[in-house]
Image (cartoon, rainbow, N blue to C red):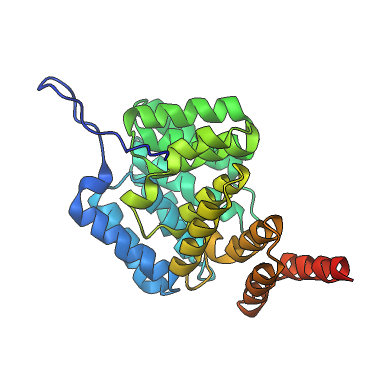
Amino acid sequence: MLVVLFAAAPCGAAADPVRNDYADPVFDRTMATALRAFYERDFTAAARGFADALARIPDNTLAMTFENATAMQTPGAIDALVSAEEAALEQHPQDPLTHVRLGFTYLFQSETGVDRDADARDEFDTAARLDPRGPAAHVGLGIIREGQRSANRAKVELLTALAADPNNILAREYLALVYQVDLREPQRALAYVIDIPNVLPEYADIDYHIASLFDDLHQPQPAIAYATRGLEIDIGHVGEAGVHGFTLLAQIYLAENKPGDARRVLRASIAANVDTDFAQALLHKMEIGSK
């Protein structure tokens, strides 16, 4: 069985300690509580929780990402966050973390139809120049490069981040995405993410990604188990696991010649009002094929 443990501190008194944000019990509990609130659609509690997590570890990129994802659920909240962070940057123009926080928020604002990707890249570039060893800016740059399908440049940025923070969940997740989607190496991708559910069990979307990787590796049983787990956590159907988990399961069941199970999860997808177009298309295709 493939198991890759998150990095442990090396032996020897002279060695620098290996960063692991999730070894901090206060931060770990705060993130777990905030993630549960997010997946239950309690966005007020989620916003408060991610803010508390960032007060504890200000440059944790997963907490930054979910703070923005939570703001996206309330009309106008992401624009208000941009305004607040731009005002903070005016007060602290040489603070790399302020640039990073604004960069991530710009990435999310781009999803509202305002193209801020170039602005986000500028903020991450500035943060990396101010603090070359800071991992957060390199994670942001890696995400941008992955979105541009620039696999090698994305790898460089994400590996740079992991050199400083080997347990950075967001860097691992996006590096796995590079290997899965761009480089077509699902086994190598899996090595970067397989242990994340042990570190942060409340993170439903990573279960969905692991399920997708096992599906690519033609291992249906673990794929089904991880996709099902993601759906059980994301009960509000707000993340990738809750939105796309049913249709991923349906495709796995169809490949295993289990049309009854496929119909069951596709109907569940339609009942939950998630990924409905794809679910209906798959059901229609099944009905045509059964005639």
* Residue 52 % position (x, y): 27, 60
Q: Position of residue 58 (x, y in %)?
A: 29, 47
Which residue appears at 54% of the width and 66% of the height? 242
Q: Residue furthest front?
A: 257
Q: Quadrant of residue 258?
A: bottom right
Quarter holding the C terminus? bottom right
Where is residue 183? Give x, y as percent: 62, 31
* Quarter in which the N terminus is drawn: top left
Question: With respect to residue 17, does 211 lie above or below?
Answer: below
Residue 213: image quadrant is top right
User: Furthest-left residue in view?
Assistant: 13
Depicted 276 relative to depicted 154: above or below:
below
Which residue is more in the foreground, 217 or 270?
A: 217
Residue at (62% x, 40% y) in the render: 147
Which residue is located at x 33 percent, y 42 percent? Answer: 92
Q: Is residue 224 left or right of residue 30?
A: right
- Residue 166 visible, this angle: yes
